[in-house]
Amino acid sequence: MDVQPTQCLNIACVEKAAMALGFSYSFFDKNKNFIEVKTPYGPKTFINCTSPANQSDLVRLAEDKEFTYLFLSSHINMPRTIGYFDPDALAEFDQYKNFHSQEDIAIDISHKFELPVIIKMNNGSQGRNVFKCESINDIRRALKKIYNKKSKNYDYVALAQEFVLIKTEYRVVVLNNQIKFAYEKDISRAVFTGNLSPLHYENAQAVLVTDQHRLGELASFLSPVFSKLKIGLAGLDVAETTNGKFVLFELNTQPGFSAFDHDNDDKLIVELYKKLLQS
């Protein structure tokens, strides 16, 4: 029996945008997840959730959460974060190691952070290997999982991050340093199933932000990021804490829109790609 191709939502929306603009396009794979669109400004290629709008240095910065923190935290409010290099990594990386063992790291984290503390992998996504640690034993277990070289999610850098009490969490979608839309990661009726990323909760919803005042507040908060970085296309994870302050968690230069599409429709996503293709 033939297997039907599975097309990424992002690419499906790129295709719709190209059709709406009358731009010709070609696919290079059977699942139609690698597309080249011929625009008046030259060809633009998209693969799954990647886009040609971002420069490679921005993509690399966004992939490395520790570097993102080091680069932006003096300009915008972010949870205090410290990176810890795997003490059991190959000897060629000894210059990056500051501790002799995972136990030394666990003790250092327990001294430098109040509990609970967030422990997570540096290069992770979609909530993988993110742990809320209530005790030093929780920290030990989290480090063991992140530094597990037999795991496909192994990372040689584990992050300890200040735990913040969140009132509301947002994904802010930015194109060419302008907010195009934002949505709330609503977990008010959701059930936690083990993944701390809000939209991985069962029955979580992506609720479009229509309040222009709130969009203005988000734009004002993020303005220091726009002055430091040229963002082509990205999703920025921002939260309002219970004390009324905004905090930036991370940048995502390969934003997926499946959760948003599930609770809304793809019109805003198609419009986003139309603007990208015309830029």
Image (tube, helix red, strand yellow):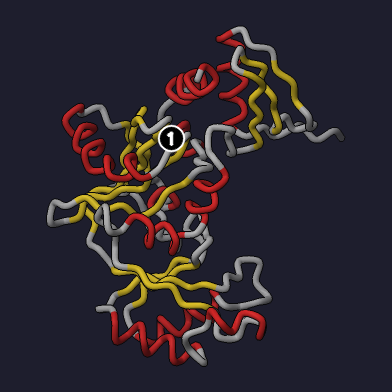
Q: Is residue 102 above or below residue 243?
A: below
- Name the residue furthest right: 1
Q: Secondary structure at mark 1?
A: helix
Q: Is residue 183 left or right of residue 85?
A: left
Front-most of residues 272 and 263? 272
- Name the residue furthest top: 22
Amino acid beneath label 1: Phe
Q: Is residue 26 left or right of residue 130?
A: right
Identity of the residue drawn at 47% across and 19% down: 275
Looking at the picture, how far across and down is residue 269, in whole percent? 47, 26
Q: Quadrant of residue 180?
A: top left
Front-most of residues 248 and 11? 248
Q: How many marks?
A: 1
- Name the residue furthest left: 243
Q: Is residue 264 left or right of residue 152?
A: left
Label 1 Cα neighbours within 10 Å, binned few <14 / some 14-19 / many ≥20: many
Q: Quadrant of residue 176?
A: top left
Please state, as top left, top right, bottom left or bottom right, where the N terminus lies in the image.
top right
Q: Is residue 162 above or below residue 252?
A: below
Residue behind mark 1:
260
Looking at the picture, how far across and down is residue 61, in whole percent? 49, 53
Looking at the picture, how far across and down is residue 249, in whole percent? 35, 55
Looking at the picture, how far across and down is residue 246, in whole percent? 21, 50
Q: Is residue 134 above or below residue 108?
A: above
Front-most of residues 133 and 234? 234
Identity of the residue drawn at 44% across and 61% down: 67
Q: Quadrant of residue 212?
A: top left
Front-most of residues 184 and 252? 252
